[in-house]
Amino acid sequence: MGDSLTKEKKELTEEEKVHKKFAVNLFNHTWKLMEKEKRTKEDDDEMIHSAHATRHHWGQIGTHTHFERGEWQISRVYAILNRPDPAIYHATRCLEICKENHIGDWDIAFAYEALARAYNVAGKKTEAKKYWELGKEAGEKIAKKEDKDYFKIELEKISI
């Protein structure tokens, strides 16, 4: 099922600990901004910068699973902001990382969801529907029921 969320069991250096702390905190901060109902232009800018920063820090300390999840979050941020080109780019990177590293389960399902959402924002309904269907198919293979249910809810939010 691809790489796990932890590299070899080894003691992290102080620098690696800092990267990990920033990666986790920035991911959560970005998520809060994504869920904020009334964002200012400054909030939108901060959300973009925070998403890219979390991906950078995971790039220093994380695994391929962290990398693709970072790409997913960046894509979602751009989709929320109605910026289809970067949303498509980062969703594509998410899917590529999943496929190259044999990462499945809900990660591959969410990679397809990200592409469906990004193409939907772009107004490219044929591509959006294609990835929505691939996401639905991948979602059926998610092992944990609660993860599968959550994924279905998120996929259904994309009105194609």
Image (tube, helix red, strand yellow):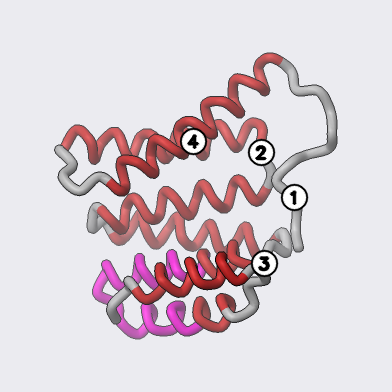
Which residue matches tag 3? 104
Q: Is residue 42 left or right of residue 2?
A: left
Earlier in the chain: of badge 4 and badge 1, it is: 1
Q: Residue at x 48, y 66 (%)?
A: 150
Earlier in the chain: of badge 2 and badge 4, it is: 4
Distance of label 4 from label 1 (alpha carbons): 18 Å
Report if residue 112 lies within the magenta region. yes
Image quadrant in which you'd find residue 108: bottom right
Q: Which residues are magenta?
A: 111-133
Distance of label 3 from label 2 (alpha carbons): 17 Å
Distance of label 2 from label 4 (alpha carbons): 10 Å
Earlier in the chain: of badge 3 and badge 2, it is: 2
Earlier in the chain: of badge 3 and badge 1, it is: 1
Amino acid type, mark 2: Gly
Find the residue positioned furthest to the right. Answer: 9
Earlier in the chain: of badge 3 and badge 4, it is: 4
Q: Position of residue 62 (x, y in %)?
A: 66, 38
Q: Is residue 140 left or right of residue 49?
A: right
Distance of label 3 from label 4 (alpha carbons): 22 Å
Badge 2 element: loop
Q: Which numbered marker is on residue 107?
A: none
Q: Which numbered disc, 4 or 1, marks the residue closer to the eye?
A: 1
- Name the one closer to the observer, 124 or 41: 41
Which residue matches tag 1? 4
